[in-house]
Amino acid sequence: PDPTRIEAENATISAGVVESNHAGFSGTGFVNYDNAVGSSVEFTVNATAAGPASLKLGYANGTTVNRPMDVSVNGTTVASAVAFEGTGAWTTWTTATIPVTLVAGANKVRFTATTANGGPNVDYLQLD
Ligand code: GCU
């Protein structure tokens, strides 16, 4: 895997559980967000330099309903209700590309569910 990959199971989980019952994930599992507004996962992304970066979030959504999430970087919302549409099955994993601006060093990148369905199942985040 990409050396910048941060597995969701190693991130800071707020209202979600680590599971491994849907094959195809990387690492040892994925996060199943609680089905609630505000459930979130926060990743610490280390950037070698300040500036624009492209992040890639690995996820699956086995429903036919969008599971939007807000994206924040270091406490500031940088994208609202980014769509994570159904992927066809909980075992069908895909990636979403999220443009952000990072500071040099550690960045707290958080994905927060905005609907009562919670987020999709989230596998990892990495620099694109
Ligand atoms: C199912 C599925 C979970 C998923 C959940 C949901 O229970 O097995 O992996 O997170 O649906 O709808 O959020």
Image (cartoon, grey):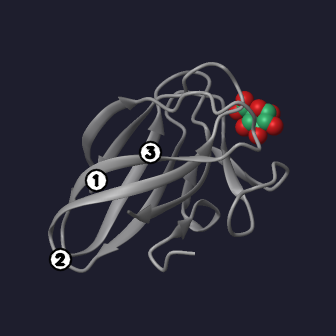
Considering only order in the chain, which callout, 2 or 1, is on the residue closer to the N terminus? 2
Circles 1 and 2: CB atoms closer than 8 Å? no
Q: If the picture is divided into quarters, which one holds ligand 1?
A: top right
Asked if the residue at label 3 sits under 8 Å from ligand 1, the reply is: no
In the displayed image of the protein, which residue is found farthest to the right?
Answer: 21
Instruction: Name the amino acid type tagged 2.
Output: Ala
- The image quadrant of residue 101 is bottom left
Nearer-N-terminus badge (2/3): 2
Q: Tag 1: residue type?
A: Val
Amino acid type at image mark 3? Phe
Front residue of this view, candidates 20 and 1: 1
Q: Which secondary structure lies at badge 1?
A: strand
x, y (%) of residue 25? Answer: 71, 58
Q: Which mark is residue 73?
A: 1
Left or right: 47 as drawn, with respect to 61:
left
The residue positioned 52% from the left and 22% from the top of the image is: 115
Answer above or below: position of 2 versus 14.
below
Can you identify the residue that label 3 sits on?
111
Q: Are marks 2 and 3 in contact (CB under 8 Å)?
A: no
Give the Cα distance between marks 2 and 3.
22 Å
Location of the N terminus (image quadrant): bottom right
Task: State the residue position of label 2.
Answer: 49
